[in-house]
Every structure is written in C-alpha cells, then in structure tokens.
Amino acid sequence: MVTHNTTRALGALALLGALSLTACDSGAPDGNAGEEELITQVTLSLTPTSSTASPVTIQANFDADGTNPTFTPTALALEPGTTYNGSIQLRDTFNDDDITEEIEEESEEHLFRYALSPASLGTVTVTDSESDYTSEDENGGDYAVGLTFQVTTAAGASGTGTMNVLLYHFDEGPKTSSTATSDEIDVDVAFPVSF
Amino acid sequence: MTSPRFLLAVALALLGGAVSAQSLSGRVTDAATGDPLPGAAVRLPTLDRAAATDADGRFSIPDLPSDTATVVVSFVGYEPFRDVIGVPRTVPLDVRLAPAEDVLDEVEVTADEAQERLGRDTRAVDVLDAEDLEELRGASLGETLARLNGVTSLSTGPTIQKPVVRGLHSDRVLILENGVRQEGQQWGGEHAPEIDPFAAGRIEVVKGAAGVEYGAGAIGGVVRIDDPDLVFEPGVGGDLSLQAFSNSGQGAGSAVVEGASEALPGFAWRLQGSVRRAGDARTPDVVIRNSAFAEAAGHLTLGYRRGPLEVDGHLRRYTTELGIYKGSHFGNLRNLEEIIARGGPDPAWDYQFSYEIEAPKQAVTHDVASLHAHTTFGDGHHVDAQYAVQNNRRQEFDAHGRFEETPGEAPSFDLSLLTQSVDLKVEPNVSDRARLTVGLQARTQLNENGETGFLVPNFRAYDGGLFAHGSFAATGRLTLDAGLRLDARTQRAFPRDVETRGFADVRRTFVGGAAVLGGLYSLGEHWSIAGNVGSAWRPPNVSELYSFGVHHGTAQFEIGDPDLGVERSLDVNATLRHESEHVSAEVAGYVNHVFDYVYALEQPDPTVTIRGTFPTYAYTHTDARLAGVDAQVEIRPLDWLDLGARASVLRADNLDLGGPLYGVPSDRFGGHVRVEPGRALGLDGLFAEADVQHVTRQDRVQPGAYLAAPYPPGYTLVGLRLGGTVDWVGAPFRVQLGVQNLFDVRYRDALGRFRYFVDEPGRNVTLRVAVPLG
C-alpha cells in the first residue's frame, strides 16, 4: 500500500520534471537585446582664424565595442604659430545617433578637456559654456563645456605629437567648476598631430 | 533486490575488506516518534570502541572479541541508554531513546559531539550548528562562513561577501540550500550568494573536491545549508530575534513560526521571514559612500509524513538591494591611478551617513520552489527524489546611465537565470556494514538578458549526471569511502559578435568525471585519521568563454576564450582529529591540483578604446596547485574556560608560468579565550569571549603581474562578545553584546576588491536579542 503510494508520488514527480525539462525555448536573443551606450566616432574640425592656413579635420573611428581606433587622416596636420577655432562631434554610427546633441542637452554634466602633448606644441582653451546650449543652468554657474575650443600652436612647433581629448561625465549632477574632474571618463582619445 | 547485493559483492571485492565473525549492529530511534537518530554515539567503553549512527540511525561495530560488554548510547537532548550485553549477539541491538526531561546534559553532549566529529567524514568538514549560527545572526552568508578555519571571504565593499574555501570561490564552490543547488550568476566575484543565513539550522562546509556527491563545480568545496527539521508534534511555537549593528546603523530581525495541528495528523509547517536594513558603513576615518543595503527574505516549508513516506515542500524568496561604494566606479585606468594616488574618497564629496541606496547598485531577487520526497521500502531501502525550480533575477545599475537616462532608473544589466532540476537517489540496504547510494541528476538552465545591457550571453543548457557512492566498514576501526560519477553539459549560447553587434549561435558539450577514494581510521575513542583522494570538474562558464569588455571597478578589459575546455581537479587530503575531555583538535593538510585552471592572464598589450587605455586580461588556462594546512585546537583546562588557536596556511602556484597563483587569501592565525562562569556557578548560558585574528600580507605575487597598487599590509583584528540569558516577563531572552574590530584598525584585505579605494569598516558594536515565541 505504502509502496504503491510512493510509486505514484514519484511517478508524478518524474512526469513534472520531464514536462518542465522539455517545455522550453532556446534562449535566443530577440531583436536588439542588450543595447548599450555607444560612441564609435569622434571628429575634430579645426578652422584657422587667419587665412594663411587651411581648415583641417581628423576622425577617429572605433569598432562597435569601442576598441581598435583608426584615424582618418592618420594625423592632424597643423601649422606652427597658428590659432584654430575647433569643434568636436561624437556619433554612434551603429545606431546613427548624434551624441553631440545629447551632450548639448546635458551640457552641465559634461566637460571636455584638451591638451597638446608634448605641451611645448601649443595650448588649447575651451571657448563655450553651458549658457550656449538649451540645457538648464542647474548649478547656478555658467561653466565650460568644451564642444568648441581654440588651439594655438607654438611658433616653433615641429615634428609629431598628440592632441588629447578627455570627456568627463558628472553623473553626480552638474559640475561645480570649469576645471572640475570626475571619476567617470567617457572619452579618452589621443589624436596624432603633425607639423 | 538482487542488483544491490550484486553491487555489494563487487564493492566487497574491490575494497578487499575482511569480514569478521563478531560484530554488533543495530539502530537507534526516537522512542516517541520512531524516527531514526543520525549521529548518535554508540560506545563500548570497556572495549575502547565506538561508532556513530548513520543517516538512518544504523550503526555497526565489527571485529569485537567474544565478551560481555557495557554499551552506552547517547544523543543530544535524549536520556542516554546503558546496558550490559553479550557479544556475539544474534539479534540487532535496537535502542529507543527517550527525549530528556531536562535541558541538555553537558557531559553526554560532549561525548556525542566528540564521536560525531571523530567519525565525520574522510574529508575535512566544518559545521556551524544552531548555537554557532545564533551568535552570528544578522551577518551575511560570506561573513558567517568566514568564522570557519580555511574559509575566507572575498569582499566587494561592506555589502558583498562570498565564501572562499581553501583558496577557491565562485564557480568552484557549490552552495546547497536544503539540498537544492543554488543557481545564480555566481561566476562574478562581486555577486554574493543569494542566501539568507537567518533560516539555517546548520551549515556544513566540505573542504576540498567533492565531485562525486555534488557534481560539476565542487572543485574547492561545498557549502550545505539546512533548515532545522520540522516539528510534527501538535502545537505552535516560534522564535523572534533582533539585531542592531552600530557601524552601519544596521537593524535586522527574523521571526519563525512553526507548528502542526492535531486535526491534520502528519502535517507540519513553518514560516520564516527576515529583514536587514543597513546604512553606510564607516571606516575608522570616513563614511563608505553608498554602502547601504536592504534585504528581505521569506521561507515557507510544508511537511507531510505518513508511515515511511516523508514529503517536504519549500517556497523561498530572497531579495536584496545593495549599494556599491561610489568611489569604486570610474571610467578608465587614468581614473584608477588618480584614485589610488589620492588614497581615499573624493575629498569634494563631503558625504554624510545615509540609508539611501543610489547607483551604482545591485538589485537581486532569487525565488526557489522545491518538492522533496523520501521513503523507505522493503528491508530498509531508501528512495529520495527532489524537484526544484529557481529563478535568479539580477539587475545592476551603473553610476552612469545611458545619455538619455537618469542613473539608477534603468538597469545597465538585467539578467534572469531560470533553473530546473530533478534529483533521484536510491540507497539500497545492502548490508549493515556498507552503504551505497546510486543517483542521477538532470538540470536545465535558461539565461536571458533584459532589454538593457549585455553582460553574459543568453544561453540554454542541459546537464545530466549519474553517480554511485558507497562507504564500507571494512573493520571496526576502518571505514572506506569510494565513488564514481559521470556528468555532461550541453549548452547553446548566443554571444554577441563584436564586429557586427549581431549574435552568434554556438553549441558546445562538456563531459566530465569525478571519483573519490578515502578512508577513516579510528584510533580508539580519542583519535581518528582520515584521508581522501577526490576529483571534481566544471565546465567553463559563459563569462570565461565569451566576455568581451571593460570590467568596471577594476579597470580591466576582459576577453573570453570560446574554446576553453573543462577544468578538473585532483585533491589529496588528510585530516587528523582528536577529541578528549579537555582537548579538541584537528589538523588537515591538502594538495589540490587543478588541471586547466581557468583564469584571466594579463596580456602584454593594453586595449585602446574610446574610453582610454585598459590593461587587458584574456581568459586562459594553466595547471595550478593549491596546497595548505588548516589546524585548530581547543583546550578546556577548566570546566568554565575554553582556549582556542587556529592557523590556516595556503600556498598556491601557477605551474605553467612558474610562481604564485593570483587571487588567493594570505595566511591567517587566530585564537580565542572563552569564559563560561555559568558552568562553575550552575547558571546557564552566560559567556564572555575574546578573539584575535592576524592576517599576513600577501607577499606571493606572480612575477611580472600587473597590480594597480601593491598588496595591502597585514592586519590584526580583535573582537569581544558577552552573552547570557535573561528572564524577563516570564520569557528567556538570549542577549549578546559584541564588538568587532575593537581597536578600530584601518585595514584592507588582499582579496578585497575595493582594496585600491577604501579601508574596510572600523569598529562595530553589535547587540543581538532572541526570544522563543509561544
């Protein structure tokens, strides 16, 4: 009697198990599952303030995972002793999103830093501030953003170097000065330059 | 049942055991319920022989001289049985023990525990019983287990702790909760086990490879967490316990209500619930920003017994939301170097203590439903069947949301892992001298990513395993243990193709075997020696196969190897145990050789990404050897005084590269003094204890290995505890006051994942109160 009950209970359990083991789908991801924030293209456009030099651009393209940069052209060709007005554009080429627009909208949470390396090649200063964009001035201060900047090359600059671009993200909320840093760097790219 | 007898014959032939003429066997049961009493001590003091009963209450003491002998049978909470019998004896000795009228008899308890410990296992096994667990209530599972010698904790700040057994952790240590294998995203070092230790009545840690009984993954050890048995006597009872912790402002509480009704004979139930809520922890100097957490768990157990049939069902939910130290989340190597140079939190924060949990954070919910049935039939054959379904939902929120989102609103990762498993075990009653278990397991898993983020690939996997495990009392002193197992896992995964951002479809099958051969030799009533050669294996997990990207908090770029094979271990260990009136001691030595140990090795070239440059680690394999000694001794020179000392030493080597293996704990030494003046004064439960632990600096570093900063220095921590029972409004309140890190020492641990950023918590005063309900 007891054995009979037991057999029945075990049978039911086995059936339950068998059903649940077979009733399943493959787990294949559907559509765009797991899409993350992506920046795959960074472009610098530099226009000289004097007419003696010509405008130059350089574009860094990354793989879809953000690795393996290629630069087009291979270096940014700058003239010594020249001042350029510059701008930066960021794109997600896979989803065809203009990230620059998103940074404009959240300009109080973003700050670009630029530097020529070695420093003897020249200086870079940021020329815009939060009030240049539509975003609310949440922190009460009109701090730098860096979507536009000015590059002044040294008169004696020659050879090659890099122009380093850093994008600090202030996820804590707005930045608190034009020289603030954060522990969140979204973009850190060294563009090759040559003279 | 001819086949079990045939198996026994084979086992006998294999083990080459000698059959003796005189033996004493029998069974120990509860006089009231007829239930078997496993772990009861059966002693023949005049012949200096002893044995402990097995899970079915059975014992056997062979190789006895023909004589008359006094037999003493004792068990915690029962009146001891004493009789004079003749050997040989024609009928089995069946002993029915009556529950003790009064509380525990101290001397008999000691004798029982001593026999239980001496004969425990051919491996080193440590147990935290209900009493130990009560003293640790309110702590996480990782913290709780770190009390045991040879077990340490891998921490990710104050909120995440996972157990490390003899230098191995995560996918190399199995956790079983009431017999159900816990299935979460345990590959991650910063993923704590989704277990509420409040509910546990007993936690057992098997140290070393245990692949035969537990299957794939039991390379470093097994943690078994079991609830107390249900109470089938009609009535309702319960227990309420509350804890407060000063360091993080943590409050915790747990309530258990259980009972059985006369109207429904054979049924019993238990409902357990617990909550923990903590604010930010504090180092001796600063508040650890965003280290608050909130946790809640509930567990419903229903049991039914009729004749030999025992059925129990469990419904369990565990849910936690925990903050991750704000300063551990940063962009790239440049950030990491700035943070290390700074030595602590961002000085601009000016952060104040809070209970708020902000991003980065984890939110995890783990649900389990299981049904377990056990019965005995025929001449004492056992059948045990279990079905379990569990779902693990893990959401991780980055400090840093997508551009259009606010941090903390949408998860960066949202993984759900659904596991179903069936276990079937048969224990034929082959002989009084031998136990045999034959079992099979089947399991299926489905892992899916939510709409945001992509951490590890979606996959579907099927596992199957088959094992036979037996023990055999070759002589009265020698017990042998042997087993074999075969497992297979087939898996279809959908890793992301990094070039196209589409998904690949990869099928792989892994096959592994496990074996164990061991022996336990009793050297009289006070000593035993055990040895064991065990093996285990595990398939590589999906993160090791298919990772590709930056691991936040370590600034490492990790690359999986889709062609990795299985990892196998061969573990040789020996344990010497001593139990006597004044001394308990255990010394265990082990060498665990892991073939094709999977790890992430630093690559010569860093990865350049749009977020900067990252040191790059690629998953690969090596042969590894983990060898060590765990030793502990407890001396009771006086009735009311306990002195203890312990040491745990581990040397782990990467045999392919030559030199130390990365990521293992450093050596630990400790001791304690415990005073129980109540024993001398005839009062119950009053105690005071001081303990000290010294952790050495990890100075074994793989030559050429990349460490963002050198390993932290060694440290010494002191703790104090004071407890007793206070009668108040007619109820016995068990009260315990404790201090951890008494001297507010600043320290960081080599295994702490936040060792670059912030110190571990400082002084913590704890208050625990528990009272029975009803």
Image (cartoon, coloured by chain):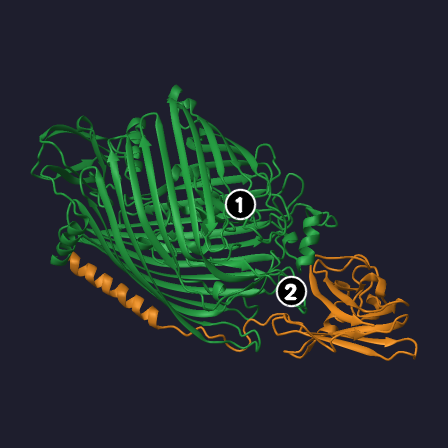
Q: Is B312 or A194 nearer to us in this picture?
A: A194
Q: How many residues crowd around disc 2 within 10 Å: few (fewer than 14), some, or many (20 or more)?
A: many
Using residue B442 as the reference point, say whether residue B604 is left or right of it.
right
Tell me residue B310's x, y (percent): 25, 52
Chain at tag 1: B
Q: Residue at x 62, y 63 (%)?
A: B606
Q: How many residues crowd around disc 1 within 10 Å: few (fewer than 14), some, or many (20 or more)?
A: some
Tell me residue B477's x, y (percent): 21, 37
Tell me residue B721's x, y (percent): 50, 31
- Residue that numbered label 2 is attached to: B401
Chain at tag 2: B
> Closer to the N terminus: mark 2 or mark 1?
2
- Residue that numbered label 1 is attached to: B700
Q: Residue at x 36, y 73 (%)?
A: A23
The chain coloured green carries which letter? B
Q: Is B482 or B346 nearer to us in this picture?
A: B482
Q: Secondary structure at mark 1?
A: loop
- Amino acid type of the residue tagged 2 in the rendering: Gly
Tell me the quadrant of the picture where the N terminus of chain B can be found.
bottom left
Question: Outermost residue toward the left?
Answer: B90
Tell me the colour chain A is drawn in.
orange
Residue B478 against residue B268 in the figure, above or below: above
Which of the 4 image quadrants contains residue B412?
bottom right
Q: Between marks 2 and 1, how big is the CA–CA gap?
A: 39 Å
- Amino acid type of the residue tagged 1 in the rendering: Arg
Residue B514 in view in this figure: yes
